[in-house]
Amino acid sequence: MASPFRSLTTVACRTQTLQSTGVSCIPRNPPIITFLSIRSQNFTSLRQSRQSSFPFKSLVRTSQRAFSISPRRSSTAKYTYGIAASFTAKDHRYNPDTNVFSFNPYNRILARRKDKRTRPDSGQDAFFVAQIHETPDVAFGIADGVGGWVDSGVDPADFSHGFCDYMAHAAYTHSSETEHPLNARSLMQRGYEDICKDPSVKAGGSTACVGIAKGDGTLEVANLGDSGFVQLRLNAIHEYSEPQTHAFNTPYQLAVVPKKVLKQAAAFGGQQLCDMPKDANASQHKLRHGDVLVFASDGVWDNLSHQDILKVVSRIMLGARAWEHTKDGVSVGSGLSSFLLADDGKSGAEEIPSLQSFLAVGITGEAKAASVNTRRDGPFAREVQRYYPHENWRGGKVDDICVVVAIVCEERK
């Protein structure tokens, strides 16, 4: 999304040309005269209605069962993950009954969804979740498309959704026996190379936050731009990513830019900028039983602080007794693993949502409400007031919202 506060004449014009394609790939905004930037209650049972803990009317219904990841061949894996996502486009009403996805590790991953109608209703935001070949490891992530490409007649969603599709397929088909070990940054690189070679994607760009959660309880994260993640542990913020920006409202981003457009932009002598997957901040984290991972686009982070996220997650986890208050503080509930599997129910019965689905829906709903609240200043509003006090920006920031939640479960606990 283009910044509403300024119009710069710098453009992105340094390229990396991939062989076998006529498209030059640069990780920055579309090279037009104006610099484009992206930024531009508790409840007692998972079976009861969300009315007691969320401002929604009915239980989450998904088209498939919610699964926690489980090892296929390896018997040494100690950790499994319950993963779900929720999302909403900025110009659509949020529907928690349909805008939710529960990960099934046994679903086949296609290289690219050809029909745009099969995309989730997440606008220019996109996400993916995929098991890494025949291992207990799982890859997941968020990509936030550059909205400014609309002015050039480009659908920004083509890049972000295609990018995620390619990362999912790369993870799903990766073989450690014939290929180098896959990490979060190399997965981002694989997806970026594939989207650059895709002849159907003429232009576009996105930020990215990619994670790989392993069966040994470690998490690798590569974050480029202002999407990001937070790791919550027992009612506390444990780790979180820092946004990468060149300037206010100008995050790092990957991009595909046609050579013809670059030549036109070069005539204006714009500043050369280039962000690549290698520029992503890479980090490793140790996970524990009961940890909650939240990966989200800036539609969340611009409207909710890490403390806001913690409040939503703690309310749900404590209400479900997945976290419990004890005399020694907060601990993980004994029945956590059972909460990660949705109840299939019987034929004709409503499917019961998993705990991770509740969390994803709760965070997305809270972010959506904050984005349209003109009286509650979110993180973005506070940043505008700091850098551009004359703009008199108040309230939330309307944007696409996408959230991926993973709950960590150690076996035999």
Image (cartoon, grey):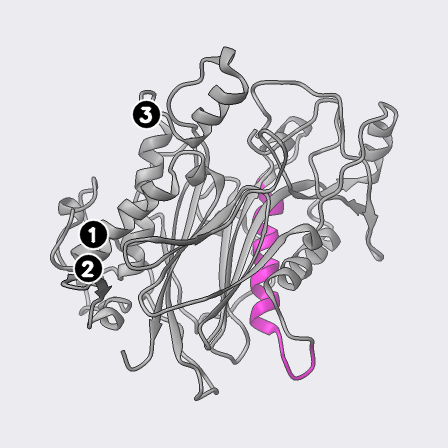
> Residue 201, image x and y in percent?
69, 46
Q: Residue at x 14, y 63 (%)?
A: 327
Can residue 312 be seen from the camera position used here? Answer: yes
Tell me the residue that label 3 is attached to.
376
Tell me the residue that label 1 is attached to.
59
Tally of marks: 3
> Residue 385, image x and y in percent?
47, 20
> Residue 276, image x and y in percent?
71, 49
**Gap in Å between the C-alphas at discs 2 and 1?**
8 Å
Q: Identify the magenta region.
A: 157-179
**Lower position in the chain sequence, tag 2 or tag 3:** 2
**Gap in Å between the C-alphas at discs 2 and 3?**
36 Å
Q: Secondary structure at mark 3?
A: loop
Q: Quadrant of the N terminus?
A: top right
Contact between labelled residues 3 and 1, with CB atoms less than 8 Å apart: no
Crowd class of label 2 (few under 14; some 14 to 19; many from 20; radius 10 Å):
some
| Viewer-side label of 2, 3 | 3
Contact between labelled residues 1 and 2, with CB atoms less than 8 Å apart: yes
Crowd class of label 1 (few under 14; some 14 to 19; many from 20; radius 10 Å):
many
The amino acid on which the numbered mark 1 sits, given as a three-letter code, is: Leu
